[in-house]
Image: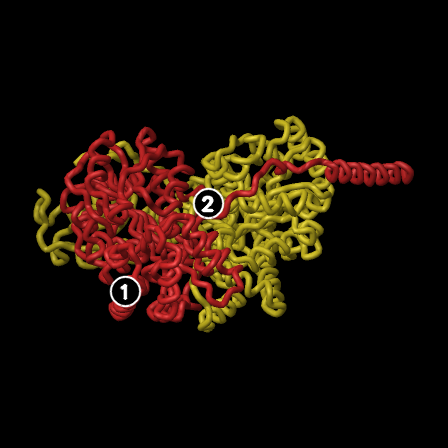
Chain colours: A red, B yellow
Amino acid sequence: MAALRAANTISTKLTTKTAAFCTRSMSSWWGHVDQAPKDPILGVTEAFLADPSPSKVNVGVGAYRDDDGKPVVLNCVRQAEARIAGNLNMEYLPMGGSNHMVEETLKLAYGENSEFIKDKRIAAVQALSGTGACRLFADFQKRYQPESEIYIPVPTWSNHHNIWKDANVSQKTYHYYHPESKGLDFSAMMDDIKNAPKGSFFLLHACAHNPTGEKGHFPFFDMAYQGFASGDPERDAKAIRIFLEDGHLLGISQSFAKNMGLYGQRVGCLSVLCEDEKQASAVKSRLQQIARPMYSNPPVHGSLLVSVILSDPDLKKLWLSEVKGMAERIIGVRSALRDNLEKLGSPLSWEHITKQIGMFCYSGLTPEQVDRLTREYHIYLTRNGRISMAGVTTKNVEYLAKAIHEVSKSS
Amino acid sequence: MDSVFANVFQAPEDPILGVTVAYNKDPSPVKLNLGVGAYRTEEGKPLVLNVVRKAEQKLVNDPSRVKEYLPILGLADFNKLTAKLILGADSPAILENRVATAQCLSGTGSLRVGAEFLARHYHQRTIYITVPTWGNHTKIFNLGGLNVKSYRYYDPATRGLDFQGLLEDLNAADAGAVVLFHACAHNPTGVDPTLEQWEQIRQLVRSKGLLPFFDSAYQGFASGNLDADAQSVRMFVADGGECFIAQSYAKNMGLYGERVGALSIVCKTAEIASKVESQVKLVIRPMYSNPPIHGASIVASILKDRDLYDEWTAELKEMADRIISMRKELFDALTTKESAHASGDLKLLKHVYMLRRQVKLSLKIMGALDICGHFVLITPPREKLGGKGAFMGEYVFSMVGVEFKEVREFFLLVDDGGVGFSGSWLIVLGLVFSWLVVVGGGSTWRTRGADSEGTPGDWSHIIKQIGMFTFTGLNVEQVKFMTTEYHIYMTSDGRISMAGLSSRTVPHLADAIHAATTQLA
């Protein structure tokens, strides 16, 4: 009996060792996996952080900085956070997120007294900031309009292409930016919209020009900067309101990353305006079904902050003034950058710097010029020449202008 | 304007989260939610761990903290500490930098990102999951791009592990397929392989070149000890092979709604791990760009501070111990002579509630109107009714929570008093009192019956099963019965969350199980 047990033990040990040997000598399943390229936007910040130069400037990712180049946590957010810390539980939110937060968020986009909200015609769920809202919508579009295509403006946030691609939605582009005028290519855009097959989906940036009148297409607004463009959230929602007045059904992705400085909290909202309450309920239930196998339910912390701030009149007032402050600082550095470039005697026109709106400036610099900016001047921006004005300060604007002038004066 | 989404129909409720929705709608005072796996205290309240409150307060009070975007893969500290938690700080895989870790949205998010990576880069698109498994697994893997097959796991006859079936099915699995394992505290069955069985599974998996994917949602909850609960995973990693691991802090740190978790991919070499990591970023970026900062910051501050870590393990053990004691109490309640003896006030409440049901039934027969859950009996003014009778009726009805309203004008075509209405009143009262007798006597009789026999069947699986859930073995009809008659909410597969029980409510549950198994065998 003992011999049997000993034999058993030995054989088990041998088997284990053999198995271990076999496993160690097995090759990896992942030997064929290639190094992925760095994300064109987030990779910029990584490179910036790795740079030891004292004069480095980060005008890459669109995260707001104060005039000292420091990230900002809004006062209204600090107050809201002090209020909620330690008071509430951390239970799961419903799949569609916090109803309270969604209600308040819809008011921002559709209007405080929107009839659509009253009539319960909006299917809306809390989403993982703007990216998450777009992704939910893209998955939903694939599921319920599988033959449809998404028209994405050129240029756009690079991640838009990835989002609809991963959702397996066929994508096309439409004219938007006019490189010569560095402004809107309105006629080309209208042509593209008219020529697109009926029932196409159009991705529109909310604080943008509005190609009204074209029906039969589904407009999807990505509103990531409400409040940042003009300093007034109501004004920045004008395009959406015009579409609504014209009788369009539409979808909106909202984000609180920039206008409430809640970047890392991943808090946003996806809404789809429907024909009636019943349809809205059905659409919401299906959006939830898409969220469930992706992350089950959205994170609670950020949504609490949004709820508290938007539903408290004093905090909301504070927030509006802080957003205005951020927008004004950006408008201010736009002027400063343009003035500096003109003072340096640049042969090029820089009026687009002050004509363009929002956090970014499409400088018109070529990828090669951008590379020079990074190599020679330690200035970090995306290779498409997009400058995040939020990274410009009164302290670095001269240096930035000088560098831009140097790399572009011969073009 | 026509909607492009006119073809969208209402989705059914999620089978697990829908249970709570139904529970919330139920007005019964004795209702019990044993559906979703969220921990509850003895008082039935959700719990935020003290150590979590401390960590959170520290974060709030720190003015240097910002809310910037995390990197795509999340908080670096959090990732390192989380990998160490499951693998052990001295794990060769960690020391050799062979682990690619990404902070993800709790367990669900980690599984989904892992699935999408596999669908893109792995040579086999099939994943095997246990029968049964967590309801969301199939959807996650399908939407992530994998084909889902199953392998035997739970044996209904023994209410334990079907080990032979498991080995046979894995042996016959498609070459190189992915296999999902629950690291500990299997959901929904609570049935875990022993360490010896895990070793056999490991050998089989390695010899067949199958790829293990561990879902670790309950580390620390199974035995109360974090290292013990990680043994299955560590065994596989110790042999030098590759695997995927999804971790969640929802339960063991009570961070449910904060969505904190991680996906770790253990690779053969550091170089491969680095490339794999870069590709995981491409999956995450178009999904949500980068993960939420709050929960991960809390976890990191707890794991990196010796005192906070010790506090956490102590609180975790308390939760695990409370669940183990609930198992024992339920088992005792179902099997001993003193079984089904509801505590004094709960028993009365139960009687009252059953009486209320009977009264409602008789009122319905009498033509009373059900207005928003209140029964409204339209009667002529009190002066016209026999004074004492009316008073008694009102008293009885109010005792069982049935609202009684009188209306000045009496609209029905009945004579003004006389035989018509006073007579009906007597009938109603008579019915009520007879129900009292029948119901009161009946239920006492039923209770006495249960006293001497205990609930039929072998209930030892309740104390043998591990973790938050018990797979009762009740069928769909029995579950439905328990919901409608006893207002006990659970998923239709008979899974109950032990975390939702307390000493006060165990007897009610035992009663319900007893009734369900004796009346609907």
Numbered disc 1: secondary structure = helix
Q: Nearer the viewer, residue A101 or A382?
A: A382
Q: Nearer the viewer, mark 2 or mark 1?
A: 1
Residue B115 seen in the current view: yes
Q: Position of residue A144 (x, y in %)?
A: 32, 33
Q: Quadrant of residue B2?
A: top left
Numbered disc 2: secondary structure = loop
Q: Chain of mark 1?
A: A
User: In 3D space, how far apart are the residues under numbered discs 2 and 1 (Cα atoms)?
Assistant: 68 Å
The amino acid sitting under disc 2 is Met
Q: Nearer the viewer, residue B501 or B435?
A: B501
| Quadrant that contains the N terminus of chain B | top left
Q: Quadrant of residue B398?
A: bottom left
Residue A34 drawn above or below residue B21:
above
Mark 2, other Cα within 10 Å: few <14 / some 14–19 / many ≥20: many
Residue A78 drawn above or below residue A146:
below
Q: Position of residue A125 (x, y in %)?
A: 33, 48
Q: Which mark is residue A339?
A: 1
Q: Residue at x 69, y 45 (%)?
A: B237
Q: Chain of mark 2?
A: B
Q: Nearer the viewer, residue A355 or A64?
A: A355
Q: Which mark is residue B490?
A: 2
Q: Residue at x 58, y 68 (%)?
A: B308
Left or right of B222: which side holds A355? left
CB under 8 Å between discs 2 and 1: no
The amino acid sitting under disc 1 is Asp
Which residue lies most toward the right here?
Answer: A3
